[in-house]
Amino acid sequence: MKLADIAERLGCRLEGDGAVDIVRVTGLQQAQPGDLAFLANIKYIDQLAATKASAVIVGDRMVQSAPPGCAVLYSQNPYSAFARALSFFNHAEPPHKGIDCLSAIASDATLAPDVSIGPFVTIGSGASIGARTVIYPNVAIGRGARLGEDCIIHSHASIRDRVVIGNRVILQNGVVVGGDGFGFATESDGTHVKIPQEADVVIEDDVEIGSNSTIDRPAVGETRIAAGTKIDNLVHVAHGVAIGKRVLLAAQTGIAGSTVVEDDVMMAGQSGVTGHIRIGRGAKVGAKSAVLQSVDAGGFVTGHPAIDHADWRKASVVFRQLPVLKKRIEELEQRIAELEEKLAKHP
């Protein structure tokens, strides 16, 4: 693909030879002639000067120090431009349209004529699958489940009964949507009685859920993941949780029951949220943080328990000095005790 064509499709300003042929997109250090690289973080500026790439995507305001002969594509968002450029060179072949003879599909299930259904897929009674949706082998889709158009469901995903999934949703391998929420009532004798989890789970349009993540079904109400949210691997969304639009949940995040996560929230890896609280719009949660109370819109919290990020940074400095501070306090206590003893002897 000619570099000029790539620049036009990305909406980038081109400086250099637009007639050069680009064969792949890769990183600055790995790039060779014929490659398109990118620079989105200024701390890697030294790698730009040494790259062998034929062209590089950089930010509009970034200082340009590309080597001689390396063309430059200027973008307002170089990371986004890089992601879109990768799609131009995606050679993965889509599976064939049609239904594999080794699948098991209920007679009253509704399938669009151009779906792709792999072997050992099971689709329950009353389920419906939208146009151009791809379902890879060994997927289980329960009774009455509804999947929209252009979805991609990877192997070993499980979509339980009556789950509703919108358009252009991607479920990676091993995702479980609609499993029972963790609900038990404790009897007077200490035994635990299971609370039936039979309410709704809704996944809206353009959601992606990473491998082995779980979205639980509640006893009442619904669990909902709103449009445009992206969920990493090994994330647990408990029963009755409401996730807003364009939320980002990194790996091993856990959100307890009936919590509300508003639009545009970002939660870093291994963070956790207790139940029945609200994370305000645009808030950020640092890695390994434990959120035990609601977070205001636009807030940034970190720590265990999570507090304002700026306060946590100051506290972390103090924490490292605790052994020294402890020793100083003990010494001061000893001196005070000695002074009190002297005063008692000589009032």
Image (cartoon, grey):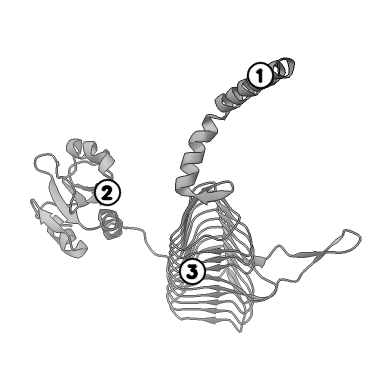
Q: Residue at x 48, y 45 (%)?
A: 311
In the displayed structure, 331 sits above or below 247; it is: above
Disc with the residue nearer the chain's start (2 vs 1): 2
Q: Which disc, if any, is residue 306? A: none
- Secondary element under disc 1, as helix, strand or loop, is helix
Q: Nearer the viewer, residue 302 or 58?
A: 302
In the displayed structure, 243 sits above or below 331; it is: below
Q: State the separation of the CA atoms marked 2 and 1.
A: 63 Å
- Secondary element under disc 2, as helix, strand or loop, is loop
Q: Nearer the viewer, residue 119 or 214?
A: 214
In the displayed structure, 125 sits above or below 249; it is: below
In the displayed structure, 273 sits above or below 53; it is: below
Disc with the residue nearer the chain's start (3 vs 2): 2
Q: Residue at x 43, y 69 (%)?
A: 206
Q: Which disc, if any, is residue 339? A: 1
Q: Residue at x 29, y 58 (%)?
A: 80
Disc with the residue nearer the chain's start (3 vs 1): 3
* Residue located beneath label 3 in the image: 244
Q: State the separation of the CA atoms marked 3 and 2.
A: 28 Å
- Crowding around mark 3 (Cα neighbors within 10 Å: few <14, some 14 to 19, many 20+) is many
Which amino acid, mark 3? Gly
Residue 278 placement (x, y as % from top left): 56, 65
Residue 192 placement (x, y as % from top left): 83, 61
* Residue located beneath label 2 in the image: 40
Q: State the separation of the CA atoms marked 3 and 1.
A: 62 Å
Residue 298 placement (x, y as % from top left): 43, 60
The image quadrant that residue 76 belongs to is: bottom left
Which amino acid, mark 2? Ala
From the viewer's perspective, tell me whether residue 27 is left or right of residue 226. left
Residue 340 placement (x, y as % from top left): 69, 21
